[in-house]
Image (tube, rainbow, N blue to C red):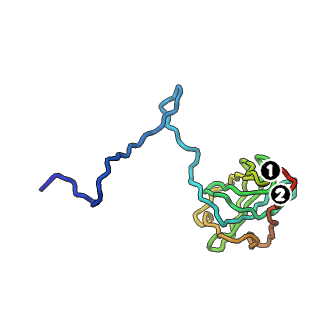
């Protein structure tokens, strides 16, 4: 019997080695490892639209059909046609792939200009989404996004309006 390893791949062997390295924080407590802020990965939201309803004035809620940029277990990013301040509360509603309605309250955590008269809103959900809720149905704009509510479409920027 030979002590040589059994080849599992017939191709040419590579001389590259994979070495895991942790970045260390600089400073007095250099024993801490740097980790990313995210606890769950983001998934692209191509073709997904949600009904976003911010509370823009006390007692007044507006329903708007917004495309999803990306989403995760605890938050999502959407396109919106108005600048909102951080801390604005509201809720997001949509259908899952299995036609279950989802409605989750959320808070605006950031608002960035996209340059085309639209804004990217970062929304933190008040609860984590379960597995089924993380599978929103892909729908064309104008479809029924929430039972009994007909949201407005995003406004197009006026031709004379400067891009932020």
In the rendered image, the residue lying farthest to the top is 28
Q: CA distance from mark 1 to mark 2?
A: 9 Å
54 or 15, which is in the foreground?
15
146 or 69, which is in the foreground?
69
User: Looking at the picture, how far across and down is residue 92, in whole percent?
Assistant: 73, 61
User: Looking at the picture, how far across and down is residue 136, in whole percent?
Assistant: 64, 67
- Residue 111 visible? The answer is no
Label 1 environment density (alpha carbons within 10 Å; few <14, some 14–19, many ≥20): few
Give left or right: position of 76 versus 158.
Answer: left
Q: Residue at x 85, y 57 (%)?
A: 159
Quadrant position of residue 46: bottom right
Residue 163 tag number: 1
* Label 2 sits on residue: 157
87 or 83, which is in the foreground?
83
Give left or right: position of 105 versus 8.
Answer: right
Residue 61 tag number: none
Label 2 environment density (alpha carbons within 10 Å; few <14, some 14–19, many ≥20): few
User: Looking at the picture, how far across and down is residue 102, in whole percent?
Assistant: 69, 66
- Total labels: the figure holds 2
Quadrant position of residue 66: bottom right
Q: Residue at x 68, y 60 (%)?
A: 68
19 or 32, which is in the foreground?
19
Asked if marks 1 and 2 touch (Cβ < 8 Å), the reply is yes
In the rendered image, the residue lying farthest to the left is 1
Give left or right: position of 162 versus 44.
Answer: right
Q: Judge whether 138 appears above or below 104 on screen.
A: below
User: Looking at the picture, how far across and down is residue 158, in whole percent?
Assistant: 86, 57
Q: Residue at x 58, y 44 (%)?
A: 37
Give left or right: position of 58 versus 99.
Answer: right
Whichever of callouts 1 and 2 sits on the residue coming sooner in the sequence is 2
- Residue 123 visible? The answer is yes
In the rendered image, the residue lying farthest to the front is 159
């Amino acid at each position: 019997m030979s002590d040589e390893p059994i080849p599992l791949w017939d191709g040419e062997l590579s001389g590259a080695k994979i070495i895991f390295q942790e970045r260390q924080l600089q400073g007095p407590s250099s024993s801490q490892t740097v980790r990313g802020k995210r606890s769950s990965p983001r998934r692209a939201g191509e073709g997904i639209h949600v009904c976003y309803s911010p509370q823009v004035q006390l007692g007044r809620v507006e329903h708007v059909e917004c495309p999803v940029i990306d989403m995760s277990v605890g938050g999502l990013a959407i396109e919106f046609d108005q600048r909102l301040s951080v801390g604005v509360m509201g809720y997001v509603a949509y259908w899952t792939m299995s036609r279950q309605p989802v409605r989750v309250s959320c808070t605006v955590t950031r608002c960035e200009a996209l340059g085309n008269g639209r804004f990217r809103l970062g929304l933190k959900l008040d609860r984590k989404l379960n597995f089924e809720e993380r599978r929103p149905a892909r729908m064309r704009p104008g479809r029924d996004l929430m039972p009994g509510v007909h949201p407005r479409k995003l406004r197009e920027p006026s031709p004379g309006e400067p891009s932020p």
